[in-house]
Amino acid sequence: MTGEEIRQTQKKYNLQSWSVQGKINPMPVKTGEGIYFWDYDGNRYTDMSSQLVNLNLGYGNEAINNAIKEQVDKYCFIGPSYGSEPRAKLAEKIISLMPDNMAKVFFTNAGADANENAIKIAKMYTGRNKIFSRYRSYHGSSFGAGNLTGEPRRFPLEPGVPGFIKFNTPYIYREAIDFKSEEEATKYYLTKLREQIIYENPDNIAAIVMETITGSNGVIIPPKGYLPGVRKLCDEFGILMICDEVMAGWGRTGKMFAFEHFDVKPDIVTFAKGVTCGYVQLGGCVVSKDIAAYFDDHMLSCGLTYSGHPLACAAGVACVNYYLDHNILDNVNKVGAVLGETLEELKEKHNCVGDVRYIGLFAAVELVYSKETREPLVPFGKDPEGIMGKIIGLLKDKGFVTYSHENMFFICPPLIITEEQLKEEMVKVDEVLTIVDEKFI
């Protein structure tokens, strides 16, 4: 097929995620290598969002490709109740990367059903029925994960499942209170959370679920002491702490998992995306030794036809080995430091940049009309003039591909990006922000 035939056929026969179908115009992609991909007209684009913040090792990774091919020649599928070498190896490898309180992995197909099964496990283990999660969050769009989700993508699922309770994300940049320090903010947010736990009856609360670092809602990094404080609240009331590492995990933040930055040990960790970099779909939830022991003599009422799919697990083993063998975390921290310095310079230079948030190669740029008032460039949930789409289009015209959410756009390149490649791409960001300063504020 030609590029145009692909475009028109897809528009005719496919429903596309999160889109008004009459407005979609999918770009046909012909090939990809490293951090780049090419369309059918030969134009090169730099993937500065790692697609959906999952293509951590970029396109055409030979080690992952070969692992999939080798498994194809053995068998593509065997059910979850059978022994499978890649399934066993990947679970063992994942546990070896976890804190010493973790024990076993339940494999799923992606991040949404990882979170679905995590909350099922939490309810079965505790015998409690309420689940806390945050407003500014995204945990998936299936029914359970969608009810965990706090932002507007949950609205089509309402009225939702009883027992899902929301609390506020510590989002200091947008908070009406002028905190003197991160520690003061932490004390405020933890006090409010503890009060809400008491009013919801702690004996009914199975788990608190959080993206360790908020992802598509703004790369919001918790203030100092916040996650240890949540851990302490969970211990006080017998509540499980579930860290959603679907986006932040697998090296994105400069550590293998984001919770490692905060000196906490979760009870359950959910993951997906970077475990295979999307070469084959895979997710999962890791449970603690106490939870694993409970299911030694209690039924684990979770099941998926493709749990621990052999092709996916083969890709996962190769992918995780590649992270370790090629010192990917070192590159994330080295290039991430340059990204942070560059973002701070752009914040100083451009009137439209209200805030920049970054950790490793996980970053968001928040655009405002005024640095003084912090008024967002587009109102919450509304962009009638399509301003953010135009900004993303300006970046794309320069070969810089990413996505936006509300008044923010994201810089989350593949973790293999070099310092030179990053600097080349950030010049494009600078040029587009200059246009935003002149035309949109």
Image (tube, helix red, strand yellow):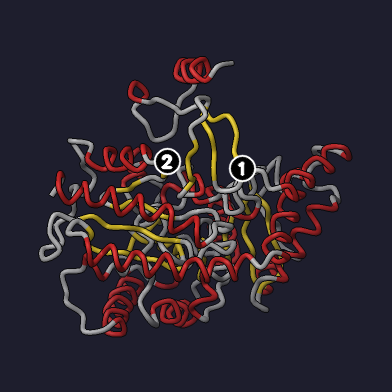
Residue 286, image x, y percentages: 64, 63
Q: Considering only vertical position in the picture, is 298 above or below 230?
A: above
Q: Position of residue 375 (x, y in %)?
A: 14, 57
Judge left or right: residue 176 versus residue 412. left
> Which three-letter amino acid code belongs to the residue tagged 1?
Glu
Dot 2 amino acid type = Gly
Q: Looking at the picture, does residue 344 appear above or below residue 218?
A: below
Between 51 and 81, the residue placed more toward the observer is 51
What residue sits right under mark 1 in the picture? Answer: 33
| Residue at the spot 28% in from the left edge and 62% down from the top edge | 346
Secondary structure of the residue carrying tag 2 is loop
Image point (50%, 59%), residue name: 420
- Alpha carbon separation for disc pair 1 and 2: 15 Å
Q: Secondary structure at mark 1?
A: strand
> Which residue is rendered at x = 50% and y = 76% of the image?
261
Residue 157 image-quadrant placement: top left
Q: Is residue 266 visible?
A: yes
Question: Which residue is tagged 2?
Answer: 399
Quarter residue 367 falls in:
bottom left
Labelled pair 1, 2 in contact (Cβ < 8 Å): no
Q: Is residue 392 left or right of residue 258?
A: left
Q: Could you tell me which residue is drawn at 41 percent across and 81 percent down?
A: 229
Image coordinates of residue 150 in percent, x first then y, are: 35, 54
